[in-house]
Amino acid sequence: MRVPSGRYSVLCGRGTLARVGKEVEQLGDHTGIFVLSSPRVWKLWGRALEASFRGVSIKAVLFDDRERVKNLVTVERVCRQLARAGADRRAVLVTLGGGVVGDVAGFVAASYLRGVELVHVPTTLVAQVDSTIGGKTGVNLPEGKNLVGAFYQPRVVIADLATLATLPLREYRSGLYEVVKYGVIGDARLFSFLEHNLDAVVRRKPAELGWIVPRCICAKAEVVSRDERESSLRAILNFGHTVGHALESVMRYTRFLHGEAIGWGMMAATLIAVALGRLGTGEAARILRLVARVGPLPELPRISAARLLEALRADKKARGGRLRFVLPRRIGKVEVVADVPDALVVEVVRQLPRLVRQAT
């Protein structure tokens, strides 16, 4: 993958976990390898990761990977653990886990001693297809999601599809919403593939996973290589995220997994596009049906209009308090639209369950 700030490799397949040690060795001399992970993921995959280093000592720094503790307190705790463990500027940080681990550890790598080398080993679907690709790192504030962070590219990303077998079904389905996103924003062929093969994808069939995961990685890499810091094109990756992030924030990151909130957000954006006359009802129905088929979504909370708008305007994609939405024009093409009427957004979110039932 090539971006203006550098170039790095993304390895994807089955059994790639065994290559982590070799890939880190090829980065050059270092003074220590520190694996940042959660206790749950380390228990599942820590031994296999250690074995890849063939006797080279590594140190594990473990922290809670729940979204509600993805904050500056956790960043400080991890940085202090690294300092006590003797990590210096020639240390290599290796992440092992999902999106929260990657976001926190990526921000730590960008900040600790003003930057140390970073290697991502994502073990969830959302991390493999989305969050570890492209260099976005960050943590949440009470006021909103990912409001503190940095753009910081890894040296290599190593995605082993075998790690997806240990994901709880709900977490796996959460990642599938991000896969659907890629189909809507720029890959009509992927969207059609999911329509026809979703059952096999949900069952984690190797052939289907081996087709969709690299395709999503390539799509993300193509966008980021053309717009590393989200000045224009990269904004399309936020389809569903404006309402989705607001839902996560309002619920204090306790009701929804990230992908579930994005699922609701994609359906809201689709219906907003229809209401504005930017998307035909037939294409909209296909999007809504596919999102709904991924799996049951947690019930939407009752949110006052004032609270919803406050959360939406706190989103980092807003400009001068003006809401910006990524809206589909057709399957495979989206656009960024500003000045969507507040009343329309509030009404669509309020009526969202009913409107989705009618369309599906």
Image (cartoon, helix red, strand yellow):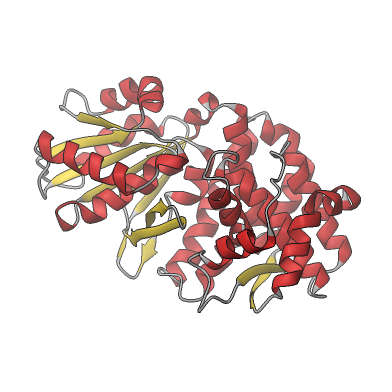
User: Residue at point 46% right, 41% down?
Assistant: 67
Decide which of 230, 323 is in the foreground and name it. 323
User: Residue at point 17% right, 58% down?
Assistant: 114
The answer to whether 322 appears left or right of 108 in the picture is: right
Q: In which quarter of the image is residue 347?
A: bottom right
Residue 130: tell me if it is visible.
yes
Decide which of 262, 298 is in the foreground and name it. 298
Percent of width and height locating residue 31: 9, 40
The answer to whether 175 appears left or right of 108 in the picture is: right
Image quarter hosting the N terminus: bottom left
Percent of width and height locating residue 58: 19, 29
Residue 212: tell me if it is visible.
no
The answer to whether 238 appears left or right of 278 in the picture is: left
**What is the total number of numbered labels drawn onto the structure image?**
0
Percent of width and height locating residue 189: 71, 56
User: Residue at point 30% right, 44% down?
Assistant: 73
Percent of width and height locating residue 15: 42, 29
Decide which of 62, 8 is in the foreground and name it. 62
User: Residue at point 25% right, 50% down?
Assistant: 109
Q: Quadrant of residue 105?
A: top left
Residue 60, relative to residue 289: is it above or below? above
